[in-house]
Amino acid sequence: MNQLSIIIVNYKVKDLLDNCLRSIFNNSQNINLDVIVVDNNSQDGSLEMIKTKYLRQVNLIASPENLGFAKANNLGFKKAKFDHILLLNPDMKLLSNTLENTLKWANMNPQAQVIGCRLVNQNNQTIFHIRKFPNFLNQLAIVLKLPHIFPQILNKYLRKNFDYSQPAKVDSVRGAFFLVRRKTYEKLQGLDERYFLWFEEVDFCKKVYENGGEVWYTPAAECIDYVGKSFAQLPRGKTQKYFRDSMLKYFKKWHPRWQYLILKLAWFFGYLISKINIKPKTKT
């Protein structure tokens, strides 16, 4: 029988978490599951809901504070039992064969240390989530709000020509559905806890390649993604701060210092530009 540990980091999305857990247990008949939920001090009834509905099915970790995405997942990993680990956002809904097909593909492709599947919205439309690794120019464009005026400037970074109908080796996959092998997670010492939110899965994929591994996308499995519902619980100014801080940490870690310094300065100008009401034309 297939075995899978699932780690879900929850923050103030009780109903979506309930929906996610229900979809897991309704669509895993042929899988030996180990489900860990790390609640980041939601205080929205999430803990009570789990204790009432899923007490015997879920290993619940109730954090007294919001640990962020990386640290909470690493905490959950300490409780995980199996060789395949799925980091799954609470605003995801699994379909009948999501887990079984993902594990089957993973077992047939040992070269893939990290695997992401096809993500769709509620209307079964593909969510375009495959990205190139961030570089200085595309992130500078984001900071200075240039895609609001020139949306095609990020086409290469956003992989606009990516074929979601075919499996492919990619730079990174979205952390919302992030299958990783235990030995890889252990070797790379988990997600970098310097990131509170954003860039942590990109950083991990970067570490995978630095250590000779590969990251793959496969359409063999599909999952519904309600996209960013936990993020929506945070004030807009705070989410922008998390994004800025994580971007700068990523560049300080992986890129020349001059790029980090210019981006840090550019954020000041980006803040001024943000005061001008320009309607975005593309999602970055």
Image (cartoon, helix red, strand yellow):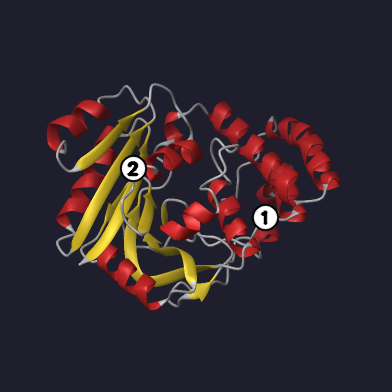
Query: Does residue 152 appear in the picture of this structure?
Result: yes
The extreme right residue here reads 258
Q: For residue 54, which quarter of the picture?
A: top left
Q: Is mark 2 on a helix, strand or loop?
A: loop
Residue 170 picture location, percent across and down:
56, 68
Q: Helix or strand or loop: what does disc 1 sit on?
A: loop
Which residue is label 1 attached to?
Answer: 134
* Rendered image: mark on residue 79: 2
Q: Which three-letter amino acid code belongs to the residue tagged 2?
A: Lys
Residue 195 x/y as whole percent: 58, 38
Which residue is pictured at 62% across the width and 63% down the height?
Answer: 211
Q: In this view, does 281 lie to the left or right of 25?
A: right
The amino acid type found where label 1 is placed reads: Pro
Q: How crowded is mark 2: few (under 14 residues within 10 Å), some or many (20 or more)?
A: some
The percent position of residue 203, horizontal first and vertical second, equals 60, 51
Query: Which of the two discs, 1 and 2, labels the residue nearer the N terminus?
Result: 2
Tell me which residue sits at (37%, 55%) in the image: 85
